[in-house]
């Protein structure tokens, strides 16, 4: 729905699959945090620089459970159904 996500760290799927999943539902996925980023999704062992960029840009950081909740509110399943 027009949101922009950045993914960091290990997720239950690959980050590429996560990016493709949100893009299939009308969102954008980029590789770096900017003022245009709506959410940073931080899996296990996230990169420190993306977390620092999110903090400096005021971008909310979600763990994978928070990401799943956000998608569920919009009627999108996470992790993607096989």
Image (tube, grey):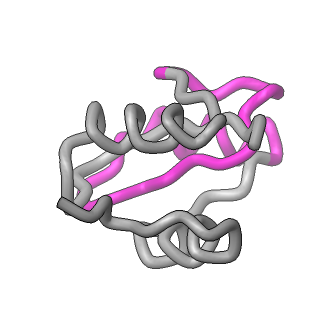
Q: Quadrant of the N terminus?
A: top right
Where does residue 60 sit, x and y in percent of width and height?
Answer: 72, 56
Q: Residue at x 44, y 77 (%)?
A: 65
Residue nearest the observer in this picture, 49 or 9: 9
Where does residue 20 sit, x and y in percent of width and height?
Answer: 38, 33
Q: Residue at x 80, y 26 (%)?
A: 36
Q: Quadrant of the C terminus?
A: bottom left
Q: Residue at x 54, y 29 (%)?
A: 29
Kindly indicate the quadrant of the structure image that contains residue 38.
top right
Part of the protein shown in magenta: 31-58
Q: Is residue 35 left or right of residue 27?
A: right
Where does residue 67 sit, x and y in percent of width and height?
Answer: 52, 66
Q: Residue at x 72, y 34 (%)?
A: 37
Q: How many marks?
A: 0
Q: Is residue 17 left or right of residue 75?
A: left
Residue nearest the observer in this picture, 42 or 24: 24
Magenta-span inclusion, residue 39: yes
Residue nearest the observer in this picture, 72 or 58: 72
Q: Please determine whether, in this image, residue 11 is positioned above or below residue 2.
A: below
Where does residue 64 sit, x and y in percent of width and height?
Answer: 41, 68
Magenta-span inclusion, residue 75: no
Q: Is residue 54 left or right of residue 59?
A: left
């Amino acid at each position: 729905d027009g949101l922009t996500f950045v993914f960091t760290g290990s997720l239950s799927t690959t980050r590429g699959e996560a990016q493709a999943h949100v893009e299939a539902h009308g969102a954008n996925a980029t590789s770096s945090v900017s003022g245009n980023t709506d959410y940073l999704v931080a899996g296990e062992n996230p990169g420190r620089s993306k977390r620092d960029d999110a903090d400096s840009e005021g971008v909310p950081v979600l763990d994978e459970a928070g990401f799943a909740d956000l998608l569920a509110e919009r009627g999108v399943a996470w992790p993607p159904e096989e």
